[in-house]
């Protein structure tokens, strides 16, 4: 038995990405630390890194990396900004999150431009991206 | 003589059955309805499946006439309207020439 024809319609339910669906994670630079939050010492990034996870060669930036990027800066995907002590310190560009090194932790590279008064230019970072709250992966 | 254009799904969206309801989900970076969930009614979902392979609008009309009871002229007009709307939001595209 044939069904009754109805005009074909598609109902559209739009939604907006908001803070709730933006993942927050921190980026820990390995140039001057262990890439997981521990700072070793101020270090000039003067040599390329042959490979990092699945991210290929990391080009050095010739910059002096210090404690702030080693200790980690919280990165908010919505605002595209680092947050250190709850205030934006640097503008982030080209975050590249690679393969997962362990649950909630990924190989990552990113760039940043110092936004402070004593701006020192553009930095290239490599290290790990780690969820701020692994038990709440969608929380920001 | 020019042949009628054939249409097929663009690949910018997926149709999934969720809890018994058909839901169209944008997956393409360029899908116009990128921030939306689309809920087709029964006939729209039928036409979606009809264009899983390249067909002309008239071929889709004939499939609809085999499946549904209704005024033929109205069905033809509404299928053609659906095709134009689906082209507009890139659910359908003109099929590649073989």
Image: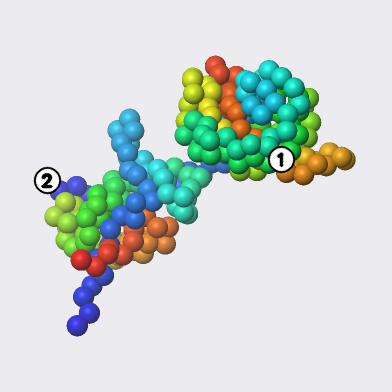
Circle 1 crowding by C-alpha within 10 Å: few under 14, some 14–19, many from 20: some
Q: Residues within 10 Å of mark 2 (few under 14, many from 20)?
A: few
Which residue is more in the foreground, A137 or A110? A110
Image location of residue A118, percent across then percent down: 87, 40
Between discs 1 and 2, the one toward the N terminus: 2
Instruction: Please report the residue visible at 58 percent of the width from the left and 24 percent of the height from the top.
Output: A130
Location of residue B97 in the rendering, given as x and y in whole percent from the top left corner: 24, 67
In the picture as drawn, the residue positioned furthest to the front comes out as A47
Q: Is residue B15 visible?
A: yes
Secondary structure type for disc 2: loop
Compared across the picture, whether A102 is left or right of A123 comes to: left
Q: Label 1 marks which chain's residue?
A: A
Residue A15 position in % (x across, y down): 53, 41
From this view, report whether residue A89 is shown above or below residue B7: above
Which residue is the extreme one toward the left?
A1
Q: Which residue is mark 1?
A: A62
Q: Is residue A83 left or right of residue A101?
A: right
Residue A6 in view (yes/no): no
Q: Nearer the viewer, mark 1 or mark 2?
A: 1
Residue A2 vertical position relative to residue A69 in the rendered view, above or below: below
Residue where numbered disc 2 is placed: A1
Label 2 chain ID: A
For this rendering, which residue is in front, A65 or A73?
Answer: A65
User: Residue shown at 20%/66% (left/top)?
Assistant: B98
């Amino acid at each position: 038995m044939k069904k009754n024809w109805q005009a074909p319609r598609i109902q559209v339910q739009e939604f907006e990405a908001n803070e709730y669906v933006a993942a927050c994670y921190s980026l820990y630079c390995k140039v001057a630390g262990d890439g997981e939050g521990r700072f070793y010492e101020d270090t000039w990034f003067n040599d390329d890194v042959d490979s990092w996870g699945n991210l290929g060669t990391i080009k050095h930036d010739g910059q002096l990396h210090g404690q702030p990027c080693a200790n980690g800066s919280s990165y908010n995907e919505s605002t595209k900004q680092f947050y250190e002590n709850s205030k934006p310190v640097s503008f982030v560009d080209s975050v590249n999150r690679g393969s997962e090194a362990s649950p909630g932790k990924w190989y990552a590279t990113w760039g940043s431009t110092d936004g402070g008064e004593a701006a020192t230019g553009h930095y290239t970072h490599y290290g790990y991206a780690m969820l701020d709250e692994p038990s709440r992966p969608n929380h920001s | 003589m020019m042949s009628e254009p054939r249409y097929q799904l663009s690949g910018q969206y997926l149709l999934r059955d969720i809890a018994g309801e058909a839901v169209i989900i944008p997956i393409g970076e360029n899908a116009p309805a990128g921030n939306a969930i689309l809920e087709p009614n029964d006939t729209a979902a039928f036409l979606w499946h009809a264009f899983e392979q390249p067909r002309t609008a008239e071929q889709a009309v004939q499939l609809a006439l085999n499946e549904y009871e209704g005024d033929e002229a109205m069905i033809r007009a509404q299928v053609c309207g659906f095709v134009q709307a689906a082209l507009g939001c890139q659910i359908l595209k003109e099929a590649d020439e073989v």
